Amino acid sequence: MRIAIYARVSTMEQSPLMQLDALRAFAKARGWEIHREYVDQGVSGATAARPFLEAMMRDAVSMKFKAVVVWKFDRLFRSVTHMLDALEHFRSLGIEFVSLTEAIDTTTPAGKMVFTFLAAMAEFERDLACERTKAGMDRARAAGHRIGRPRAVVDEKKLLELRYGENKLSVRQIAEKTGISQTVVFKRLTQAVLKGTAQFENGSATEPQAKV
């Protein structure tokens, strides 16, 4: 089986050789072929942007290997959430995962059970996040707060002038000129005409039957 090895050390003074030697020996003992060694040196585990990790994830999508092997979870993952998301991504691609020091090996039946458990945990975390968000929105609505973007401040008189005045702009042109969506422009124009409140700056009334 073709595998990817990933190693990381936090400073340039540290050496990844201890990790790499152990990973190479493990691959040799299992009879696995190493596709590539991805090594981020001098990169903190909390850093999201890691060149070789990003390269490995791209190669994973391209199916250039069938398993990822690391020395320890914290060499690859920066948080529990990152771990769960990444493992779920590997699972969706059919890529196995091995962590030597945590004795996690999804190529074995026991390891597959752990993988299934971690995938369930990831789904559980997402469901909890959705529930917390929904509960927060419900509380805000109950307290009288508006959810979502604030309503656009619309000057109906200005919209009517742009639509029926000298230039007679289209709804799309008005939207581009005012930065208001076409849907809102159309809705407010229609409301103004139906209410019979439309007026131009010169005081003339807009014809109520005017097309919007």
Image (spheres, rainbow, N blue to C red):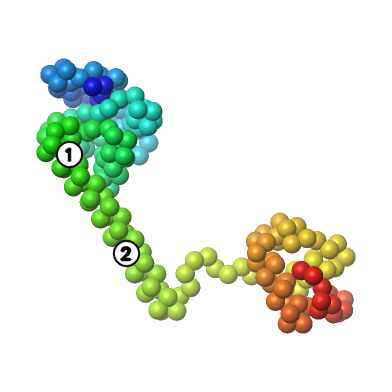
SS of the residue at dot 2? helix
Could you say where residue 95 lies in the image, as x and y percent from the top left? 27, 32
- In the depicted structure, whether residue 134 falls above or below residue 102: below
At label 1, the amino acid type is Lys
- In the depicted structure, whether residue 208 falls above or below residue 159: below
Could you say where residue 168 lies in the image, as x and y percent from the top left? 84, 63
Residue 131 tag number: 2
Q: Can you say which quadrant of the picture contains the N terminus?
A: top left
Residue drawn at (37%, 74%) of the image? 139
Residue drawn at (30%, 27%) of the image? 40
Crowd around label 1: few <14 · some 14–19 · many ≥20 (10 Å): some
Q: Can you say which quadrant of the picture contains the C terminus?
A: bottom right
At label 2, the amino acid type is Glu
Say left or right for 152 vs 178: left
* Among the two numbered marks 2 and 1 on one chain, the one whose residue lies closer to the N terminus: 1
Residue drawn at (37%, 32%) of the image? 61
Q: Nearer the viewer, mark 2 or mark 1?
A: 1
Could you say where residue 128 lies in the image, as x and y percent from the top left? 28, 60
Give the residue number, with chain letter if any, for mark 1.
112
Residue 60 in which image quadrant: top left
Residue 119 visible somewhere in the drawing: yes
Could you say where residue 170 lies in the image, as x and y percent from the top left? 78, 60
Q: CA distance from mark 2 to mark 1?
A: 29 Å
Residue 42 tag number: none
